[in-house]
Amino acid sequence: MRPPFWRGKPGPSHRGDSEGIAFNRRTLLGVGAALTGTLALGRNAAVAQGEGASPPADAPWSQSLGAGVVDRPYGSPAEFEAGVIRRNVPWLTAGTESSISFSPLQHLNGIITPNGLFFERYHAGRPDVDPKLHRLMIHGLVERPLLLTMDDIVRFPSVSRIHFIECPANGGMEWRAAQLNSLQFNHGMVSCAEWTGVKLSTLLEEVGLKKEAKWAMVEGADGAHMNRSLPLEKCLDDCLVVYAQNGEALRPEQGYPLRLLVPGWEGNVSIKWLRRIKIGDKPWHSREETSKYTDLMPDGTSRGFTWLIDAKSVITFPCPEKPLHGPGLYEIRGLAWTGRGKVKRVDVSVDGGLNWQTAQLHEPILSKALTRFSMPWRWDGKPALLESRVIDETGYVQPTIVQLREKRGTNSVYHNNAIQTWQVKADGSVFDVQLS
Amino acid sequence: MFSFRSGQMSGRALASRLVIASEAKQSRKPRSKNWIASELMLLAMTAFCWFSVPSSASAAEAGHFGYGTTPTAEQIAGWDIDARGEDGVGLPPGKGDVATGEKVFAEQCAACHGTFGEGEGRFPKLAGGQGTLKDDRPELTVGSYWPFAPTLWDYINRAMPMPTPHTLSSDDVYALTAYILNLNNIVPNEFVADRDSLPKVRMPNRDNFIWTDPRPDTAAEPCMSACRDPKSVTISSTAEGRDLTPRTTGPLDDMQPK
């Protein structure tokens, strides 16, 4: 005898609808049976609205049989997490194909960004590349040009590394003034994952570099054939050609089936949908390293090849999206990172930078990876100005926006790694502000 | 794989190293454990260096793994689309003039970039802005900002038109390049763009780029207490009430500029 649930898929009523959970008849009966004692005294409505202090001892989901294995063969988040998504600023770009989306840092915990929430940056939309047809060509000043299939690439010795990727335009809307009241939109162009692939040095040794080789041009298979120049020292140091992200194949949004990973450098050089590496003796000065990704200074000069991501930190709780609810003990939490190596120390201020305390760093503390910090804070309910300041292993200290403006003005777009100030009001609400 | 590779890469050198080590073992008695450890460390470091620093010597040994295929000349030619900005190396044969460029631009580009490169909506402006780079609101265009003319050919060829990339002929790309340079008053009406003429075009902003990163350019001090006068801490700007922030809960926002 098979139990009733075995007979086939439950009807649509079991699955819920767009407004949330819809219980099937059996579940509703179960709830009815449970509505005894205090719950029977007309309080179920309050419980349903989340106002009650006493959830039912045996909730509906405890009184029914759950869905079986492979109900969702590729898992997905709980439906209550539907608002935890990448978001864009629609007024920022002409369309979504050459645009950016931001990772919801306010909802994330730990140092690893889930693959579906990793920030996006496209220059010609997201190509859906067939891995069987994808090739990587390595040519130019090499002894033996190579054309590699994905199967070929996976055969090479593999390594896994945890690294962040940050778009250098992260925070770029805040050079002039505080504009966006959001952790997600001010800092969400950074994400961190475990990447698996082959060292670029392995591939370059395989093709054999000629003596005059000094630069590599890396190019994507997207419609823009996005390309950048990289000095060979960096290519041979720690660059990876990766096909996996957090244990699974790269997402199409992240360059499936193959991308370059340039640890600690601006995200733009980590070419997605990597199709070609050409070795040369000089840089290419492509559009993306002349017209864009250069930093205009107040004197009219511009800085080019500013690849490094300087040390940066931000408090992720509290933040505009996650305010405080009344005085009491809280744990201030945040993330810090640096393209120069490891985070050495993070200090936190609750008075706008007058006084600082050193926060606790959480393991693992990895080179060129997001690093967690926290500090307990008993909030007295008075207005506060929260800041964090990272110092990396080279001794570099995260600057204020005032210090950055003194050197770079307000039109350099990229590489704003300023200290973020969150204004906490007496009602617990949090706002993005800048201090004089 | 790794040890196999480093052994192959420098097998002879590694072998001689081992011989030296074993000879030393025989001649020096007694040996301390530390000596063995340091010798092993040296071996490991040497192997590591051999592996991680490719040199012209490794070039001679290219193709160790032997995976993949050697691309044919035709395959390389098909993929090898780049043209270098500074010297134009890689520019293909062909040519295009300003008048042709104007026609192609009207058909292929003007919908987004405007008839005269003024830019529609939030699409990039391609012309104008010269002399504005020190202004409070600088205009960065091909004419005011781009340092190298061949980069323009390369970019149009690799990425434009956005909805139908890689559909223009080399001649059309040359013509568009000529037209956009002409819109910026950088080349005369009779200019013909080709692989010889483009690298010789002197872009107005050519010498205003510094190609070495001057950072760190801030010297912040990690002061811990009484770091500044409390009265000097004032809020200079706030995002509150600016009405620029899309919502961060519920469905995606489609807010447009106010």
Image (spheres, rainbow, N blue to C red):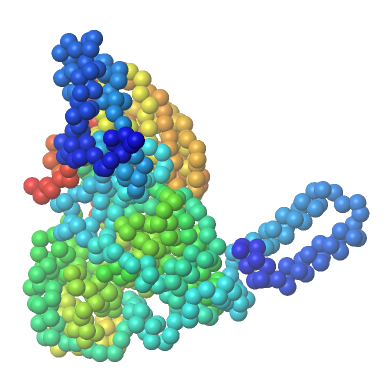
Q: Write the residue at 52% across / 80% down.
A: A144
Instruction: State left or right for residue A65 relative to residue A396.
Output: left
Q: Give the position of the N terminus of chain B as an image quadrant.
A: bottom right
Q: Write the residue at 10% across / 61% down.
A: B121
Nearer the observer, A409 or B160: B160
| Residue B115, percent from left and from top | 8, 73
Nearer the observer, B139 or B163: B163
Nearer the observer, B220 or A239: A239
> How many marks are shown on the rendered structure?
0
Nearer the observer, B4 or A23: A23
Q: Is residue B213 above or below residue A320?
A: below
| Residue A397, percent from left and from top | 43, 43
From where the camera sits, is residue A129 visible? yes
Instruction: State left or right for residue A253 relative to residue A198.
Output: left
Image quadrant in which you'd find residue A398 = top left
Image quadrant in which you'd find residue B154 = bottom left
Q: Write the residue at 53% across / 80% down.
A: A143
Single out the residue that lies furthest toward the front: A1
Image quadrant in which you'd find residue A104 = top left
Q: Is residue B242 above or below residue B156?
A: above
Q: Write the residue at 43% across / 68% down.
A: A150
| Residue A163, percent from left and from top | 44, 51
From where the camera sits, is residue A290 visible? no
| Residue B257, percent from left and from top | 10, 49
Q: Is residue A174 above or below residue B103?
A: above
